[in-house]
Image (cartoon, coloured by chain):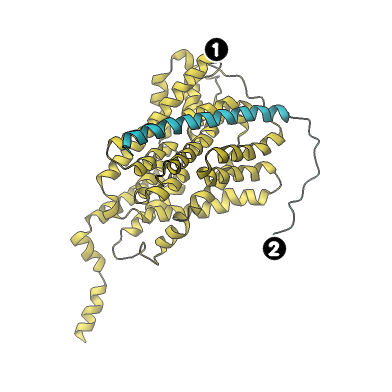
Amino acid sequence: MDKWVFGISMTVVGMGGTLLTLWILSLFTVILKKAFPPVEESPSAGKSEGGRAK
Amino acid sequence: MIESILAGLSGLGAGFVYLATQGLPNVIMMLVGGALLYLAIKKDVEPLLLVPIGFGCLLVNIPLGDLMEQGGILRSFYDIGIITELFPLLIFVGIGAMTDFAPLLENPKILLLGAAGQFGIFLTLLLALALGFSQLESVCIGIIGACDGPTAIYVTTQYAPHLLGAVSVAAYSYMSLVPIIQPPIMRLLTTQREKTIRMAMVQGTISKTTKILFPILVTLVTGLIAPKGLPLMGMIMLGNFLKESGVVTRLTSASENEIANVVTLFLGLAIGGTMEGHAFLKMQTLAIFGLGLVAICLDTVAGVLFGKLMCFLSGGKINPLIGAAGISAYPMAARVVQHQGHLYDKKNYLLMHAMGANTGGQIGSVMAAAIMLSVLKGMGLV
């Protein structure tokens, strides 16, 4: 493959893909925040971490 | 009898003979190792990495020690942790455990700054191609712009292991020089008015459920889009998930302390072990250092320019300075933004917004690497 074809393809797909993926993530994050809004959480008793792994 | 004594003596001091006859590159690299140690100890430049790298560099350049030959201690670290990609991935678990995505979750569109901050990777890739590096070498050099040591090591080990020493030292050195590299670019690209934009305070309105589900969401989405990067993204999100779950504090603590510290030591020694004089001292090493600097500068330029665009589109609500934090040098880049904003308006507190952009940059840098790896696979080059 010609190096410039490679370079420009990588730049377009790489940069475009990164922007697109993070944009998608930002949309999902907004949905997540709306689906799980902060609520008043009562202080819970201390949770145990389980026994030491054998 | 005399011959056997003389034969025995010839085994001593052979190192001096080697240095005197063909060891000039080794001497130079011992000085380089000393310089790295000086920077780490006296100037506090990334000491956690540069101390073991510098010492490893010293060790491997002492002739005839065979530390990087089969069975040598540095070779063992290299084979166990670098070739297998184990060390950078374990460090990523620790990094995820130390990262707080809450500022990012408060304002998710800041993730786009984390994407813009990776532009330098791809422009540097093109420059490296122009300078005559091969396609895979150019990818590894461009990844210095990710400002992320483990990512750079992960990619370079797979596709250009002969460049590992140069790429790693460049990546870690420039990360620590962010407070010097970024401010002039930030000042040049922003107007006085833009520098003093105050952003709305971060409200602290993220539920625990959101914080727990976020790393799972990121892993799923990014893993499906760019599967070749799943080890990287999966490990950093694992670390964050351990932290946010709140029920495995021992594992979280071990990830960010014992595991990260031990692995950092062995990783640094192994990288130092690749810096043997005859292999390291080439014109291409200088070119790599130059291109690495260009990558970080271009990242900053792209981040600030994208910040200006977001400022315009938001009607002036976003301070473009936070765009400079869209790189993976966490939390240093965020502190640089806070400092720069403070210089022009003592009552301007940009830190939490910059932290959001900085953590977005962490995700962006790993995503950029993941996409490059997947594209290479798609093109049939690997």
In the drawing, what numbered circle is on residue B302?
none
Q: Which of B159 and B67 is in front in this view?
A: B159
How much space separates mark 2 and mark 1, taking CA atoms?
A: 58 Å
In percent of width and height, residue B271 lies at 40, 52
* Quarter occupied by the N terminus of chain A: top left
Residue B345 visible in the displayed image:
no
Chain B colour as displayed: yellow
For the point 41% across and 21% down, the residue is B187
Report in which chain the residue with disc 2 lies. A
Label 1: how many Cα within 10 Å (few below 14, some 14–19, many 20+): few
Judging by the rendered image, the residue that carries numbered circle 2 is A54
In percent of width and height, residue B106 lies at 63, 27
In percent of width and height, residue A32 lies at 68, 30
Q: Residue furthest bottom?
A: B1
For the point 52% across and 55% down, the residue is B262
Residue B324 visible in the displayed image:
yes
Q: What residue type is labelled 1?
A: Gly
Label 2: how many Cα within 10 Å (few below 14, some 14–19, many 20+): few
Judging by the rendered image, the residue that carries numbered circle 1 is B315
Q: Which amino acid does label 2 sit on?
A: Lys
Chain A colour as displayed: cyan
**Horizontal side, residue B160 vs residue A42: left or right:** left
**Horizontal side, residue B340 vs residue B275: left or right:** right
Question: Could you tell me which secondary element the residue under label 2 belongs to?
Answer: loop
